[in-house]
Structure formats: C-alpha cells, structure tokens
Image (tube, helix red, strand yellow):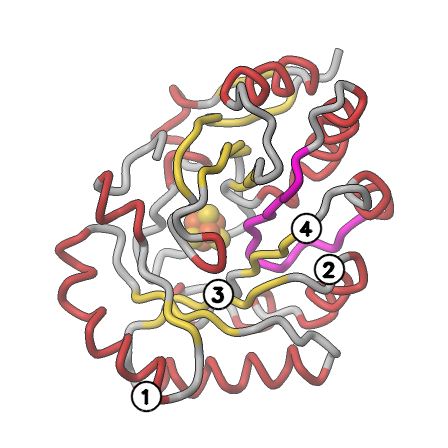
C-alpha cells in the first residue's frame, strides 16, 4: 500500500485569507520545491532536513481516518485545508483521500489548497474535487523577498490551469512594505490577469513571529487598503505563536 509523506494533521482555525477564523482540519504534506531563504519560512518543519523527526508516512486510508477523527461533526461548514510545504507535489495523495472521504459520505463542503502556484494540476485532481461545494485555490506567489527566482516563482499558466478547475481563489502575497515589493505585487498580478486569472489579491505582512509582525503590519495594512487590496493578518501566529499544530 502506498504511503504518503506528511508532517501533521490537526484541527484549528484558518489563520489567513478569506476563511480566517473558520474552524478547519489541516493536512500538512511533507516537502517543498522552494526554500524561500529571503525570509524565514514559517513551515520549515514540513520540508527541512533538520525536522526529519517530524516526517510521517501514512496511506490515504490512514490519513482519511485521521481527518475523520478530528472532525466528529461533519457539518455544512466542514472545511479541509490541504497545505505544506507545497501540497501540489502530493496531489495524487489528496485526490485519493478526497475520493475515500466521499465514499464514506464525509466529503468536506469546503476545501482550500494552500499552494505556491508552481505545480501544474493533473487531470485527476479536477475530477476528484468537482463535488465539493467550494474549492479555493489559495495561491501564494513568491516575490523576490523570498529569494526565489521570478521565472520559477511566478507562473501564470499554472495558476490559470487552477482557475480552469475552480474559479474560487486568492492571490496571497507576503510583502515587506518596500516600494520594490509593491511594484512586484502589481507586475505579478498583471501577469496573472493577462493569463485570465481573476482571483482577488490579499496582502500579508512578512514575519513569522508576533515580534516581527508588530514591526511592520500597521503600515502595510494602511498601504494595502489604500491600494485597494485585501489585508490578511496571520491570526494563528497572534493566537498560538506560530507553532506546529496550529
Ligand atoms: S514555498 Fe512556502 S512552504 Fe515552501 S519554502 Fe516557501 S514559504 Fe516555505
């Protein structure tokens, strides 16, 4: 039986973007195609070799059971967040898990996929998620403050392929408030618009800790609304201190 790599599965609130505050089951897959050395990745423990002790392996059936245990009341608002690392590297895994949940009558009403927007979706992904009420592509394209190469990080064709599967999505940028960063938000967003992606823009302040966030988030929030974008705090970091399992 195929075993998939993951780091954790837990119940918390969604801390960022459109569903902030909504109770959610998180399945965090292992591995990422980036390292984002320009800022500290807040989920390094899901891909870095220093955290190999957190690497787990489980079959799709075992992961389905973990999700079901965490969500005893499969309500109208049941929200599953598939995250990482980069979960689109594990798309065959979550396709299988969603299929099993559906067979059990426990398909989530809402599914969010937290992705960096660089991995092309395969056809199977489109078929398995067609029955959820809303599939939200939560795409976080990495600007140059991440340290990643623009050509690798900003991939409009990939995000356009996501939009073909579901029109629900968000472009969630991490910014440091510099003029360069704001320029890049505009350039990247225009590239996505040119590819036919209409997902709304959300801005999040850079910073993995509450200390870092408190230094820059007020001004970034003001600049965000002035520019007509949505602002997202990192609610989980404020409440729980940005640690695993939250
Ligand atoms: S893409 Fe996301 S998970 Fe991967 S290194 Fe960058 S911030 Fe971390």
Quarter residue 36 falls in: bottom left
Q: Residue at x 21, y 78 (%)?
A: 219
Alpha carbon separation for disc pair 2 and 3: 15 Å
| Magenta run includes residue 142 | no
239 vs 35, nearest the viewer: 239
First-in-chain label (4 vs 3): 4
Disc on res. 172: 3
Q: Secondary structure at mark 1?
A: helix
Q: Position of residue 20 (x, y in %)?
A: 41, 52
Alpha carbon separation for disc pair 1 and 3: 18 Å
Residue occupied by mark 4: 135
First-in-chain label (4 vs 2): 4
Q: Quadrant of the N terminus?
A: top right
Query: Image height check: is 79 above or below 116?
Result: above
163 vs 20, nearest the viewer: 20
Q: Is the residue under label 3 in contact with that under label 1 (CB below 8 Å)?
A: no
Please name which of the two marks, 4 or 2, marks the residue nearer to the observer: 4
| Magenta run includes residue 110 | yes
Q: Secondary structure at mark 4?
A: strand
First-in-chain label (1 vs 2): 2
Disc on res. 179: 1
Residue occupied by mark 2: 162
Alpha carbon separation for disc pair 4 and 2: 10 Å
């Amino acid at each position: 039986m195929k075993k998939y790599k993951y780091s954790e599965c837990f119940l918390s609130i969604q801390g960022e973007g459109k569903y902030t505050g909504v109770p959610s089951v998180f399945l965090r897959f292992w591995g990422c195609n980036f390292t984002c050395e320009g800022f500290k990745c807040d989920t390094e423990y899901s891909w870095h070799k220093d955290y190999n002790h957190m690497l787990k392996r489980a079959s799709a059936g075992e992961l389905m059971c973990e999700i079901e245990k965490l969500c005893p009341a499969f309500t109208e608002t049941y929200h599953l967040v598939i995250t990482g690392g980069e979960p689109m590297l594990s798309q065959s895994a979550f396709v299988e898990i969603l299929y099993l949940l559906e067979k059990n009558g426990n398909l989530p009403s809402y599914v969010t996929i937290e992705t960096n927007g660089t991995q092309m979706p395969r056809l199977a992904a489109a078929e398995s998620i067609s029955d959820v009420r809303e599939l939200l592509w939560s795409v976080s394209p990495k600007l140059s403050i991440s340290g990643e190469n623009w050509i690798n990080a900003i991939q409009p064709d990939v995000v356009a392929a996501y939009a073909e599967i579901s029109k629900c999505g968000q472009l969630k940028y991490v910014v440091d408030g510099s003029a360069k960063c704001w320029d890049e938000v505009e350039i990247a967003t225009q590239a996505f618009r040119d590819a036919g992606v209409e997902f709304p823009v959300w801005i999040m302040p850079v910073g993995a800790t509450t200390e870092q966030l408190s230094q820059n988030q007020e001004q970034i929030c003001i600049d965000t609304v002035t520019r007509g974008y949505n602002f997202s705090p990192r609610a989980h970091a404020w409440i729980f201190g940005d640690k695993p399992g939250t």
